[in-house]
Structure formats: structure tokens, C-alpha cells
Image: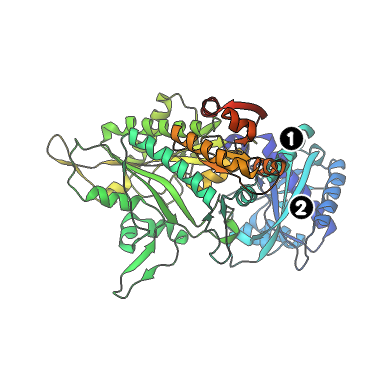
């Protein structure tokens, strides 16, 4: 969450709405035990232990009604600071142990311990909150989910109640409308309906299967970026899906990333291998395989590399969070004097990709290290150099950027593009990272103009992020109605009767002779024309070309556009000129 939101009144309002919900829950279910209830990006939630109770939508309605009653009481929300011992006694009196006691124990010595009270309800909380429950007017409880205490599968499963709140009813209504629209755009449903991808419990969770149309969409994106990368001086490489544990020991990933790796495999010779979680160590080994001169740099290796990461089952979300995915990955090796130009060019490529995909609304976020964490590797000097290089590049390009401490990779700072889709939802997609540390860990060198060895700098980048996540985003952004250049089937020919199939085939051949890359289908099923139109409209094909006796006689096609409806008869060349823009 960005700092402006955390410091906003809306954040405090939603935090207070979470307390209003918790108060109402305890009134209706006195034996419930509260855990944590924070504001989140679009609302709030509270994790609650209801014992053996099974929750239903009717329970949500009851809680929401009680929330309205408590809001109408306009109860003052009062902050109180207590000593650790007083806080412990308060929690025991509230009968909210052991969860609140565990949270209390996690508060560092010397930090302020605060409680907030509204009427008969008190909660351990650091705030902030609004002044009274009467300020919480425009809220809605949304759904129920399960969540493990402290996010660990080893702990008890709790009930998570989600809700949202806004300053005005108009804002709430707009948000609820967008939620309904989002359900219609859910990429998991559209992906199956449009024949893009599927998941199988027999194959395993988080492992997508690409169906023919989805594979075509994936290939279209891949070919587009490959062509653009070649124009910009990238060289393709291919690396294996497993690698020795020694490689990841050297990179440091085993120390910092082990919980995201699948179980290690040991062969008959006693060598241990890892299912590849990232591509960078492989690209580094390719760089290191030859003696490099300063004249060789920059070197830009690009790979559509499939990687595997162990995500907990509760974290999986269609194509947006999977266990096996393909990154449009690249690693650039350069001299220090080339860093700024290469970073600017990489940002330029990422923005070019976003605009080509129709994603014009984006923000830029600079992820820096958290000074209080010890998860980062490398010297303070290198971190400062890397962070200042990214800032300088953003300023040179006129990009406004937000600094997000703690969001850096363990080996270096990064720049993320935060994309806003058609419903105003924000997605973290393309990322660019500056890395002084892996070149040191792998002892990378190039021979400088002075004849001495020097250390190169690396840039890691992936404009799509991953093909899976990008296709999930695009499916929801376009509600499955992809632009013509991306659509898996761009044109479908609809012969009115069996005698028109031969002419449809000739039209297809003529179109392909003009542009062999066109993706054209012929619907020669026995269905009536009206049903064919309805079925292909549901498949969101950009153009349907109806062909009958008059079309065959006049060498035309009757054009139906997905967006504009019936356009009428056109000559084939004229139609194609219209379709290609």
C-alpha cells in the first residue's frame, strides 16, 4: 500500500469500519475471538475464530445490520495507552486470548501499546481511527474466506470477513458496480469459456494447461516481444528447467528464497538439483563462459524461461498466481558508464510494451531496501549507487515515481510499473532491477580499456512480468474481447449453407495470400446462420464474414463487427484494409 493511502482519512475510516464489524460480531457471537483486522487496498478484513460455527451469507447480513445500528449510536472512538502488564490484564479481561496476547508479545519493547474503545468494545490496536462510529456510514460486507492464523498452514484456520467503506455513497456504489463487472470479467471463467486455458486437479494446483486458442494468444505475445527485443539489440538464449543446488548456493537464492522452491532432487550420483525458480543464475553462467572486453558490453540476454515456485495453495489465483509460469526474462550486463542509458532504454521498452497492449494508465514505483531488515546482500555503497541510478533515469525520462521502502529484491533495488485496468484496479506488472551484487557473487569481469579486469553491472527486467499473469490481466482488462492483433481467432467465415463452404475456403485463401499471419476460421457447422452468429459473438471474435449466393456472385463478404454490428457487404481487399487499420 502506498504511503499516501496509509496516511489518508480513507485508511483510518476503513480501519474504524473493521472495528465496527468486530464490535458487531462480538455482540452477536459473544464466544468469538478476534485476531487481526487491518485496512487493505480496497477495504478491510478481520480474521476471527468462531470455533465450530459454519458461516453463511445470512450471518453477513446480520452483522451488517448490527454495524448500521452501532454506527447510528455515534460512539466516540477513544485511544488509550497502557503499560505491557496493564495491556495483558486488559486482554485477559476481554477474553481475547491467546491471539491478542501473541500480538502483544510481538510489540517491541519500548513501543507504545495502545487500545481503542467505542462503547463496550475495546481492541488492541495502533490506529489510526476516525473520531466516532457516526462517521462510518457508507460500508458493505462483501464475502467470507478462510485464513490461517499468522498465514501459516501449521496454525488454525480462521474465518476472514471482508468489507469495504467509502467517504460517500456514490463512491461505494461505483465500487460495488465494478465488483459485479469484475465477476463478469473473471479471467478464470473467461479463460475456460473462450478456450484459452484450464486447470486440472489431476495435473496439480497452480499448473495451467494452455488450450489451442490460449497457446495462440501466448505465441502472439511472445513473437511480438521477441521481434521488438531483436530490434533493440537483445540476443536469445535458452536454459534448462533444473539446475544444480551449487548454482543457487552461489547466487544466494537458497538462503533468501528457499521457502519458494520445490523440494530438491538428488540423483544416483549424489548430486542435488533444483526445479528452476528464476533464470538469472543461468544467464550469468553464459556471460561467464567467455572472456569479455569492454567493447563487448552491453550484452543483453533474453529468454522466455519457464520457472517454478512453491506458492501455498491459499495464495493461488488462476493465472495471476501460479506455480509454473513463463517469464519474459532478460539480463543485461554493462559497464558503469552504460548503466543510465541501458536503464532508460529498458524503461522505454517496458512502457512501449504497455502502450502496445492498450495499458496506458500506469504509475512508477521505486522499491528500495528496508534499512531495518537483514535479508539484503551487498555493500551500502553499491545499494546507494543502484538506487540513485534508478532515480536519475526516472528524472531524465520525466517519470513521477513513488519510493517504496522494503520492496527491493534481496540483491538490488527495482522499478515496478503499476498498471491500472479498465475497472481502475491496480496491477504490479513489468519490473526492472539494478544489480551490483550477483556480479560480485559470481566474480564476473570484463577487461577494460586499461587492460585490467573490471566488474560489470546487471539489469534484470521482464516487461510482461510473466505470460500467465499478463494474459490474466489482459483477459479481464478487455473482458475477453482482445484487440484484433491479439485475438486468437481474428476472423471467422460463416457460410450460410453447405454450398457456400467452397467460397468461404476461397475467401480464406485470398485473405491469407495477402497476410499469411492472419488467424482465420471457417464455421461450417450445420447450425443455422443466426445461431452461428450468436455463438461466435460469444467467442468475442473481432470479425464475422457471412458468405452467401450474392457474396459468391459479387466476390464480396458481408461483414459483422464484434463492436459495431452489421457493416454490410464489402470487397475482400477493402475489408482487410479496414480490419488492419
Q: Look at the picture and state if 511 lies above or below 184.
A: above
- Looking at the image, is mark 2 or mark 1 nearer the viewer? 1
Q: Secondary structure at mark 2?
A: helix
| Quarter of the rendering occupied by the N terminus | top right
Total numbered labels: 2
**In this orientation, does residue 489 appear?**
no
Q: Quadrant of residue 166?
A: top right
**In this orientation, does residue 549 appear?**
yes
Could you tell me residue 250's position as x and y percent?
30, 57
Q: Is residue 370 left or right of residue 456?
A: right
At 56% from the left and 29% from the top, the residue drawn is: 555
Could you tell me residue 55's position as x and y percent?
78, 61
At 78% from the left and 47% from the top, the residue drawn is: 20
Q: Which residue is mark 1?
A: 174
Give the numbered dot on residue 556: none
Could you tell me residue 173's position as x and y percent?
77, 36
Mark 2 / mark 1, whichever is N-terminal: 2
Q: Look at the picture and state if 152 lies above or below 114.
A: below
Q: Residues within 10 Å of mark 2 (few under 14, many from 20)?
A: many
At 47% from the left and 40% from the top, the residue drawn is: 430
State the residue in front, 195 or 501: 501
Farthest left residue in view: 451
Q: CA distance from mark 2 to mark 1?
A: 25 Å
State the residue in front, 395 or 405: 395
Q: Look at the picture and state if 170 lies above or below 112.
A: above
State the residue in front, 320 or 97: 320
Give the numbered dot on residue 22: 2
Farthest bottom residue in view: 268
Could you tell me residue 180's position as x and y percent?
73, 42
State the residue in front, 507 or 464: 507
Q: Secondary structure at mark 1?
A: helix
Q: Is residue 374 left or right of residue 402?
A: left
Amino acid at each position: 500500500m502506498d504511503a499516501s493511502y496509509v496516511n489518508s482519512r480513507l485508511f483510518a475510516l476503513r480501519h474504524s469500519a473493521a472495528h465496527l464489524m468486530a464490535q458487531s460480531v462480538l455482540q452477536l457471537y459473544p464466544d468469538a475471538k478476534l485476531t487481526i483486522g487491518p485496512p487493505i487496498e480496497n477495504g478491510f478484513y478481520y480474521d476471527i475464530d468462531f470455533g465450530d460455527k459454519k458461516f453463511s451469507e445470512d450471518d453477513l447480513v446480520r452483522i451488517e445490520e448490527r454495524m448500521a445500528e452501532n454506527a447510528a449510536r455515534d460512539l466516540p472512538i477513544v485511544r488509550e495507552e497502557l503499560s505491557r502488564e496493564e495491556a495483558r490484564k486488559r486482554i485477559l479481561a476481554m477474553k481475547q486470548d491467546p491471539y491478542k496476547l501473541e500480538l502483544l508479545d510481538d510489540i517491541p519493547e519500548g513501543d507504545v501499546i495502545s487500545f481503542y474503545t467505542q462503547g463496550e468494545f475495546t481492541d488492541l490496536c495502533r490506529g489510526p481511527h476516525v473520531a466516532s462510529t457516526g462517521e462510518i456510514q457508507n460500508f458493505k460486507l462483501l464475502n467470507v474466506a478462510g485464513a490461517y492464523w499468522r498465514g501459516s498452514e501449521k496454525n488454525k484456520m480462521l474465518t476472514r470477513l471482508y468489507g469495504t467503506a467509502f467517504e460517500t455513497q456514490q463512491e461505494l456504489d461505483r465500487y460495488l458496480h465494478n465488483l459485479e463487472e469484475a465477476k463478469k470479467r473473471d479471467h478464470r471463467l473467461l479463460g475456460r469459456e473462450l478456450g484459452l486455458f484450464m486447470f486440472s486437479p489431476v495435473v496439480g494446483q497452480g499448473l495451467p494447461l494452455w488450450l489451442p486458442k490460449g497457446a495462440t494468444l501466448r505465441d502472439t505475445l511472445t513473437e511480438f516481444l521477441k521481434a521488438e527485443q531483436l530490434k533493440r539489440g537483445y540476443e536469445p538464449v535458452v536454459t534448462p528447467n533444473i539446475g544444480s543446488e551449487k548454482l543457487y548456493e552461489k547466487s544466494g537464492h537458497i538462503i533468501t528464497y528457499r521457502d519458494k522452491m520445490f523440494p530438491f532432487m538428488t540423483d544416483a550420483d549424489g548430486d542435488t538439483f533444483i526445479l528452476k525458480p528464476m533464470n538469472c543464475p543461468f544467464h550469468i553462467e553464459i556471460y561467464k563462459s567467455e572472456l569479455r572486453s569492454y567493447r563487448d558490453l552491453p550484452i543483453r540476454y533474453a529468454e522466455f524461461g519457464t520457472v517454478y515456485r512453491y506458492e501455498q495453495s491459499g495464495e493461488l489465483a488462476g493465472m495471476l498466481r501460479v506455480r509454473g509460469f513463463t517469464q519474459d526474462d532478460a539480463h543485461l550486463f554493462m559497464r558503469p558508464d552504460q548503466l543510465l542509458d541501458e536503464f532508460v532504454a529498458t524503461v522505454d521498452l517496458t512502457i512501449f510494451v504497455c502502450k502496445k497492449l492498450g495499458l496506458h494508465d500506469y504509475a512508477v514505483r521505486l522499491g528500495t531496501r528496508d534499512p531495518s531488515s537483514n535479508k539484503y546482500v551487498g555493500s551500502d555503497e553499491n545499494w546507494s549507487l543502484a538506487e540513485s541510478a534508478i532515480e536519475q533515469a526516472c528524472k531524465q525520462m520525466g517519470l513521477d515515481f513513488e519510493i517504496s521502502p522494503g520492496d527491493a529484491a534481496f540483491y538490488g533495488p527495482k522499478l515496478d510499473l503499476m498498471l491500472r485496468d479498465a475497472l481502475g484496479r491496480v496491477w504490479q506488472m513489468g519490473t526492472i532491477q539494478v544489480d551490483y551484487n550477483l556480479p560480485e557473487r559470481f566474480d564476473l569481469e570484463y577487461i577494460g580499456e586499461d587492460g585490467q579486469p573490471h566488474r560489470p553491472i546487471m539489469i534484470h527486467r521482464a516487461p510482461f512480468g510473466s505470460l500467465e499473469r499478463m494474459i490474466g490481466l489482459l483477459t479481464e482488462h478487455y473482458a475477453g474481447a482482445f484487440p484484433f492483433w491479439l485475438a486468437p481467432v481474428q476472423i471467422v467465415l460463416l457460410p450460410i449453407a453447405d454450398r457456400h463452404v467452397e467460397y468461404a475456403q476461397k475467401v480464406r485463401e485470398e485473405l491469407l495470400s495477402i497476410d499469411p499471419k492472419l488467424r482465420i476460421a471457417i464455421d461450417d457447422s450445420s447450425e443455422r446462420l443466426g445461431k452461428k452468429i450468436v455463438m461466435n459473438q460469444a467467442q468475442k471474435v473481432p470479425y464475422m464474414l457471412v458468405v452467401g449466393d450474392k457474396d459468391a456472385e459479387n466476390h464480396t463478404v458481408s461483414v459483422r463487427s464484434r463492436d459495431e454490428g452489421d457493416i454490410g457487404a464489402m470487397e475482400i481487399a477493402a475489408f482487410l484494409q479496414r480490419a488492419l487499420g
